[in-house]
Image (cartoon, rainbow, N blue to C red):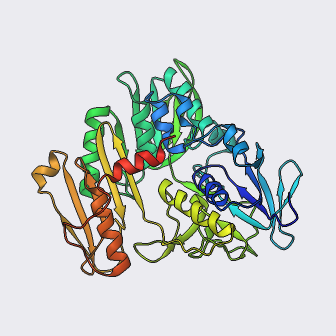
């Protein structure tokens, strides 16, 4: 390391981290760059794990790069290591192998981990399945191949994507849902009903709505060791495996909350800086400005993580760039039905909603709904034909940025679903 080289440390090795690496190295210079990851493999895409589960891609296609990428970018790798303490005064990060890294600028891009069910013993909770890492995907794939009955806790994106990935005619999949609809954080009730009916019909998946989990314990089934899930209704559900999809929590246990502002995640400004100027955060661990609502909140998706990492990396390299804010957006396909939600689908205040498709079309699977707030589009929900979701996204973002609505002929990225797929692909 040259005398003028700065010490840059990145905690994490996924979307935000890789974008930061590219941004930093694009500026040239001889800064010493260290990447710390608790996983021992090169970077991969967690959003592709359901494609791997259903056999659409081989495991090798999960990876975004190989080990030569880090050599080519002159990176010191600390794989298989986790941060355990951060001292912002000394500008050091302590790792779980008792080593200590010094930094001049630090990016926290440690992502998030699945939330475990409350009131469940740790050993029981550990034995259940979660889908976040490549190891999680391998475990689910191995267990699902031998299972005859699967219980899925939750009906959010992860739960439904996992259920869709493992479903087969001889496997009974049951989703236990605390609310009264699927995808309650992403869809309105009418669209959710369309999705539910499609998933039940095409995937044979059973939903138990309005139930919470009272207890989970191990039991013996005819096929071997299994699980008994007792519901708040008193019903008992036996399964060979239990999959939990009840949300995620940012990986920030090593952060000193007396020095770095933390809310639901690490709070960042419009330059991705934390409350300590030379410490940045990006991705699922960062809570910043929502571009649509203007509020400060956690918006976790792949495209925003990439862009946040890019801006944070360039700022670590000496620039002074602002990030325009995150846009909540999800595009998925469940048993052949494309589903998309963009922007504020559950806005506060004086909100009116306009369904652009008649009920007959909605029943046929073509559903469109634009959410309006004070005369401006703030969100959209679509199922079936989502080909112009990119135009709708552009309209929503421009309305948020300018305070003016655009007409239907406005230009924008037409193939937003394709852009999402391209961003996720290795």
Quick check: 122 above or below 220? Answer: below
Question: In the displayed structure, does residue 251 sit left or right of residue 236?
Answer: right
Residue at 61% over, 59% down: 23
Q: Quadrant of the N terminus?
A: bottom right
Q: Is residue 265 visible?
A: no
Residue 15 on image: x %, y %: 57, 52
Q: Is residue 230 visible?
A: yes
In front: 238, or 347? 347
Q: Residue at x 53, y 33 (%)?
A: 61
Which picture quadrant has residue 128? top right
* Residue 362 % position (x, y): 16, 51
Count all numbered tags in the image, as a single digit: 0
Residue 331 locus on image (x, y percent): 37, 50
In x, y percent, where is residue 341? 34, 57
Q: Quadrant of residue 327?
A: bottom left
Compared with residue 23, is residue 386 higher up or lower down, i.e. above or below?
Answer: above
């Amino acid at each position: 390391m040259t005398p003028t080289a700065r010490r840059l440390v990145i905690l994490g090795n996924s979307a935000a981290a890789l974008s930061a690496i590219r941004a930093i190295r694009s500026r040239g210079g001889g800064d010493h760059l260290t990447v710390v990851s608790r996983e021992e493999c090169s970077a991969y895409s967690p959003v592709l794990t359901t494609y791997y589960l259903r056999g659409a891609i081989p495991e090798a296609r999960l990876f975004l790069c190989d080990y030569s990428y880090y050599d080519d970018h002159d990176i010191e790798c600390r794989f298989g290591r986790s941060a355990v303490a951060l001292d912002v005064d000394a500008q050091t990060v302590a790792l779980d192998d008792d080593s200590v890294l010094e930094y001049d600028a630090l990016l926290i891009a440690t992502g998030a981990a699945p939330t475990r069910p409350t009131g469940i013993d740790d050993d029981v909770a550990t034995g259940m399945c979660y889908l976040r890492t490549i190891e999680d995907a391998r475990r689910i794939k191995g267990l699902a191949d031998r299972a005859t009955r699967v219980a899925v806790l939750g009906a959010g994106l992860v739960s439904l994507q996992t259920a869709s990935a493992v479903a087969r005619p001889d496997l009974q999949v049951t989703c236990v849902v605390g609310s009264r609809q699927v995808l309650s954080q992403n869809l309105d009730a009418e669209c959710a009903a369309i999705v539910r009916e499609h998933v039940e019909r095409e995937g044979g998946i059973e939903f138990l709505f309005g139930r919470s989990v009272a207890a989970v314990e191990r039991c013996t089934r005819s096929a071997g060791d299994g699980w008994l899930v007792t519901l708040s209704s008193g019903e008992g559900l036996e399964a060979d495996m239990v999959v939990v999809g009840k949300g995620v929590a940012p990986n920030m246990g090593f952060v000193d909350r007396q020095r770095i502002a933390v809310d639901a995640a690490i709070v960042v400004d419009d330059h991705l800086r934390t409350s300590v100027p030379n410490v940045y955060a990006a991705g699922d661990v960062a809570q910043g400005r929502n571009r649509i609502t203007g509020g400060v909140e956690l918006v976790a998706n792949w495209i925003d993580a990439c862009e946040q990492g890019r801006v944070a990396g360039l700022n670590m390299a000496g620039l002074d760039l602002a990030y325009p804010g995150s846009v909540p957006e999800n595009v998925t396909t469940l048993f052949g039905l494309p589903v998309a939600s963009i922007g504020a689908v559950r806005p506060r205040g004086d909100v009116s909603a306009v369904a652009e498709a008649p009920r007959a079309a909605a029943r046929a699977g073509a559903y469109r709904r634009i959410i309006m707030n004070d005369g401006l589009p703030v969100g959209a929900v679509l199922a079936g034909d989502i080909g112009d979701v990119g135009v709708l996204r552009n309209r929503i973002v421009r309305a948020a940025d300018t305070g003016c609505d655009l007409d239907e002929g406005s230009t924008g990225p037409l193939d937003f679903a394709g852009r999402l797929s391209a961003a996720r692909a290795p």
